[in-house]
């Protein structure tokens, strides 16, 4: 589906539907679904993901891509759909928490809570 104006790149809106059988025209201001924002490649990826019931190993095998590529594609599609995903702690953040634990600045319970907070 064409989503952006080929001239100015603004978002296009749907204003008319036509029945291919009886040729009736329905005019209005219609909203395209969120999935219309996705490329054909993204839609194929989603179909494979759903077909495999979210089994990343099956997605890797069917599309011939690696685990990190599958995860990156999922994150990209979530972003395009406006879905916020939980991002885990960076390696540096985890090490900082463990350092604070080792130095006695926080308790084990606090460290576990902090490490689990962004899962």
Image: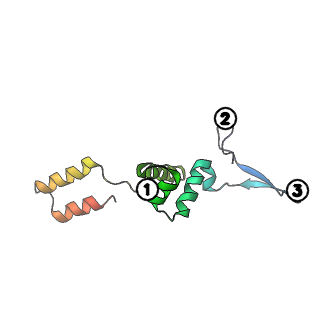
Give how far across and how far down residue 86 sits, in percent.
39, 57
Q: 68 or 31: nearer the eye?
A: 68
In this view, the residue farthest toward the top is: 7
Circle 1 packing at 10 Å, graded few (<14), some (14-19), many (20+), is few
Disc 3 or 2, which lies upstream in sequence? Answer: 2
- Tell me how far mark 3 sits from mark 2, CA to CA: 31 Å
Label 1 sits on a secondary structure element that is loop
Q: Is residue 93 left or right of residue 75?
A: left
Question: Which mark is nearer the camera, 2 or 1?
Answer: 1
Circle 2 packing at 10 Å, graded few (<14), some (14-19), many (20+), is few
- Tell me how far mark 2 sits from mark 1, CA to CA: 31 Å
Mark 3 and mark 2 in contact? Answer it, CB < 8 Å: no
Circle 3 packing at 10 Å, graded few (<14), some (14-19), many (20+), is few
Give how far across and how far down residue 78 sits, in percent.
50, 53
Q: Which quarter of the figure has residue 50?
A: bottom right
Task: Point out which mark residue 104 bears.
Answer: none
Q: Residue at x 44, y 58 (%)?
A: 57
In this view of the protein, can residue 7 be seen by the observer? yes
Q: 8 or 71: nearer the eye?
A: 71
Q: Is residue 45 left or right of residue 108?
A: right
Residue bearing the label numbered 1: 85
Residue bearing the label numbered 3: 23
Q: Which quarter of the figure has residue 119?
A: bottom left
Disc 1 or 3, which lies upstream in sequence? Answer: 3
């Amino acid at each position: 589906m064409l989503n952006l104006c080929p001239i100015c790149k603004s978002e296009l809106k749907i204003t008319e539907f036509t029945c291919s059988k009886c040729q009736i025209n329905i005019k209005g201001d219609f909203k395209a679904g969120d999935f219309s924002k996705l490329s054909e490649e993204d839609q194929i990826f989603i179909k494979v993901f759903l077909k495999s019931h979210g089994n990343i190993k099956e997605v890797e095998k069917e599309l011939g891509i690696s685990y990190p590529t599958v995860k990156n594609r999922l994150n990209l599609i979530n972003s395009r759909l406006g879905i916020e995903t939980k991002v885990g702690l960076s390696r540096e953040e985890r090490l900082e928490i463990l350092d604070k634990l080792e130095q006695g600045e926080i308790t084990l319970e606090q460290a576990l809570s902090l490490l689990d907070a962004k899962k």
